[in-house]
Amino acid sequence: MRTFRIETWGCQMNTHDSERLEGLLRSEGMAPVENNSGAELVLLNTCSVREKAVHKIMSRIGELERLSPRPTIGVCGCVAQQEGKALLKRSSAIGFVLGPGQIGRVLEAVRAVEQGERTIFTGFDPEEDYHFQTIFRKSSTRGMVTVMEGCEEYCTFCVVPYTRGREVSRPVDDIMREIEGLTGVGVREIELLGQTINAYVCPETQTTFAQLLSRVSDLNGVRRLRYVTSQPRHFGPDLIQVLSEKPNVSRYLHLPFQSGSNQILKKMNRKYTREEFLTLISDIQLSVPDLNLSTDVIVGFPGETDEDFLQTLDILETVRFGQVFAFAYSPRPNTPARKYTDQIGESVKKERLHRLFEITDRISTELNQALVGTIVSVLIDSHSRRTDRDWQGRGEDNRVVNFPVTGRERVADIVDVEITRAGTHSLYGQIVGRETGPALPVL
């Protein structure tokens, strides 16, 4: 097999895992292609956090089976770990199954297929080397860096501990070397990744996540620094202090609260109360008042009453998140909540989700419209998806900003943009100043 295509579902971790997979395949001389008809190998890097995502992946396997010539399919990611051998029975087109803890064995799996074997690599190997030098970076402006894998929170709704394994933190010196390599080729924004990133502790030096964040922010060339995903119960004063003192740490924070009801939080095993969450938000906003907050919410968790749901809406109105990622509860394999007997009907979930989005869309629109007339610093990513006459980038608070091309700027420039209008999900403006970016290699 000499050509491949990677299709990615899910979170930033999956996106970054796909960069790792692509780098390894390219190192073997394989070439990526843009369409299915030219790909001898199609990797599906999958997500199993929600049932709907799994259904889409199974449907996609069926579509690929019907292609002529039929490509070999490699199922990677969380569905691979979750389903294991059952996937090989699902379709003869699936050549191998590769869990997220086995990414480094993708070339071994490809060679096995070429010899007529179908293989399965799942489970977690704490000794597996993380070769960041082979990662194929999709962006020349932003670089994702994994600082830890796995999760040990065991929320009763979540499949991640079973598909990503136990928490494993990378040595701080390895992380710093990777980031120095990225800034050395012109990457201006670093995004640190981990399922529960603020639980990070260096296995060699005991460096905490707050200390790591501070060290990375001090590196030359790190103009912006982001991180996901934080767990509220691990968010301490030391991390708040770093946010308030380091100007290049993003004015964007993703902090899932999942439910506003203490009864539901306890059933979810979230290990904090609504009062503790609201106190934390108050402390953060007091120290960093210009922070753009986003969150995750689950509606229709087993046993959620109308009053429980209203308490969730109350937190949304109180905190006023800039972005909210909300989902109807979906039972997942191996999780305790799927066995709860007080499941909520689909029609109730749908109605509650609709009510929630009405509120969050209104709040997002109001927050964005309040920025009209202000000047924001925007890192240019690419042309707008709608027209080549506009640039698209993100402000320091991670909001999407579009603005006209003048011919004097380029990708990776940081420009000052005056916001002239605002919608629910993006801003539009005009350039009023610019800072030229470094000379960039073609990645």
Image (cartoon, rainbow, N blue to C red):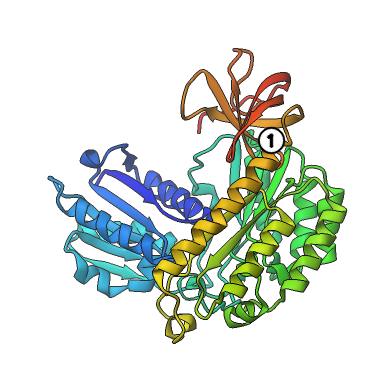
Residue 390 x/y as whole percent: 54, 21
Mark 1, residue position: 369
Choose between 49 and 194: the one closer to the eye: 49
Which amino acid type is shown beneath numbered disc 1?
A: Gln
Would residue 341 be found to the left or right of residue 420 on screen?
A: left
Q: Secondary structure at mark 1?
A: helix
* Residue 402, placed above or below residue 151: above
The picture places residue 39, in percent across and down from the top left corner, at 25, 43
**Residue 288 falls left or right of residue 257:** right
Q: Is residue 223 above or below residue 231?
A: above
Residue 414 in percent (x, y) is at: 69, 28
Instruction: Give the residue drawn at x 81%, y 52%.
Output: 243
Residue 350 relative to residue 154: left or right = left
* Residue under the point 32% across and 37% down: 34
**Above or below for 94 versus 288:** below
Residue pictured at 58% horizontal, 63% vertical: 297
Residue 74: % across, % down: 29, 58
Residue nearest the viewer, comparing 92 with 314: 314
Q: Is residue 167 visible?
A: no
